[in-house]
Image (cartoon, rainbow, N blue to C red):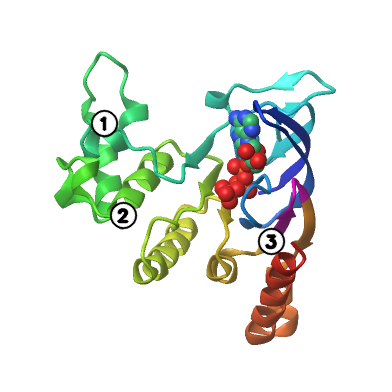
């Protein structure tokens, strides 16, 4: 799916102004945004999700224009068909796993119907969560919470998954396992994803296209999949590591 972004965002807090000016284009299903803290990675995916409005520009996803300042287009967040996983997964603490996963299917104040319950049940099975259906988020491990958040996002059949540092809250062993799970899920659902990270291992495991950010701008766009094909896996890993390390070294 093609994701094309060319936006300016201006955010003002009491102390200062943050300006984001980014442009990139990718047809790969696995895009990673890498860069130091405060570079504007989260602001970018919030703009894709429709949670922040750019001051200028255009966002196109799979042939749909989500935002175009010149044409006066700004689709509301609920119409953008994006699944957004926040850094802390943003589960509802007072709802159990079934209710969290099925949140978007529920037509309040009516209870879930038979068909909706079946869809949720199938999703829980797929994510190995069926034994935890009645548990609340506080009773779940980090990996389980992430699976609930992923199941909830995928149940809405989004055009793209936006993942903001999906493994940041996990220990190293769990990170490795969840990276593999995420890759499997992405392949199975065929849903493109945009992943934000500071972690070079995430870049190596998940990036087909890598967009490196620095101070509110795109420093480089790297076609990692092409590098792997052209240079071989080992050499491509070295090159990607160099690009990412160079980025930090310049700061
Ligand atoms: N709602 C907001 N109002 C004002 N400034 C904001 C707002 N949201 C983010 N910012 C500022 O925008 C800048 C970029 O933030 P952003 O969260 O996109 O960084 P990031 O690259 O995702 O960093 P991290 O890796 O630490 O999450 C920061 O300086 C932040 O203070």
The percent position of residue 120, horizontal first and vertical second, equals: 27, 39
The percent position of residue 178, horizontal first and vertical second, equals: 39, 63
Q: Name the residue that disc number 3 marks.
A: 209
The percent position of residue 235, horizontal first and vertical second, equals: 69, 85
Residue 142: numbered disc = 2
Question: Badge 3, how many Cα within 10 Å: few under 14, some, many 20+?
Answer: many
Q: Name the residue that disc number 1 marks.
A: 115
| Mark earlier in primary sequence (2, 3) | 2
Marks 2 & 1, CB-CB < 8 Å contact:
no
Marks 2 & 3, CB-CB < 8 Å contact:
no
Q: Secondary structure at mark 1?
A: helix
Magenta stretch?
210-217
Question: Badge 2, how many Cα within 10 Å: few under 14, some, many 20+?
Answer: many
Q: Secondary structure at mark 2?
A: helix
Q: Write the residue at 70% across / 66% down.
A: 248
Residue 177 falls in image quadrant: bottom left
Query: Which dot, 2 or 1, sits closer to the camera?
Result: 2
Q: Quadrant of ligand 1?
A: top right
Query: Which dot, 1 or 3, sits closer to the camera?
Result: 3
Q: Is residue 128 above or below residue 40?
A: below
The answer to which of 155 and 69 lies nearer the viewer is 69
Q: Write the residue at 72% across / 58% down.
A: 212
Cα separation between marks 2 and 3: 27 Å
Does the Cβ of the disc 2 residue fall within 8 Å of ligand 1? no
| Mark earlier in primary sequence (1, 3) | 1
Q: Is residue 108 above or below residue 233?
A: above
């Amino acid at each position: 799916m093609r994701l094309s972004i060319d936006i300016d965002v201006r955010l003002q807090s009491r102390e200062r102004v943050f300006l984001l000016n980014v442009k990139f284009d990718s047809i790969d299903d696995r895009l990673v945004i890498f860069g130091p803290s405060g570079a504007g990675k989260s602001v970018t995916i919030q703009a894709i999700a429709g949670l922040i409005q750019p001051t200028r520009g255009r966002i196109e996803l799979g042939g749909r224009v989500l935002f175009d300042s010149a044409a006066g287009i700004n689709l509301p967040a609920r119409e953008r068909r994006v699944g957004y996983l926040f850094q802390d997964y943003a589960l509802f603490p007072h709802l159990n796993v079934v209710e969290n996963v099925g949140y978007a299917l529920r037509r309040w104040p009516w209870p879930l119907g038979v068909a909706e319950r079946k869809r949720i049940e199938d999703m829980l099975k797929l994510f190995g969560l069926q034994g935890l259906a009645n548990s609340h988020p506080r009773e779940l491990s980090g990996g389980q919470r992430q699976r609930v958040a992923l199941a909830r996002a995928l149940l809405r059949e989004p055009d793209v998954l936006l993942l903001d540092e999906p493994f940041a809250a996990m220990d190293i062993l769990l990170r490795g396992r969840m990276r593999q799970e995420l890759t499997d899920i992405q392949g199975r659902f065929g849903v493109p994803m945009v992943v934000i990270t500071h972690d070079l291992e995430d870049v190596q495991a998940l990036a087909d296209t890598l967009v490196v950010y620095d101070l509110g701008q795109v420093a480089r766009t790297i076609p990692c999949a092409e590098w792997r094909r052209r240079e071989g896996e080992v050499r491509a890993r070295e090159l990607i590591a160099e690009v990412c390390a160079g980025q930090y070294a310049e700061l």
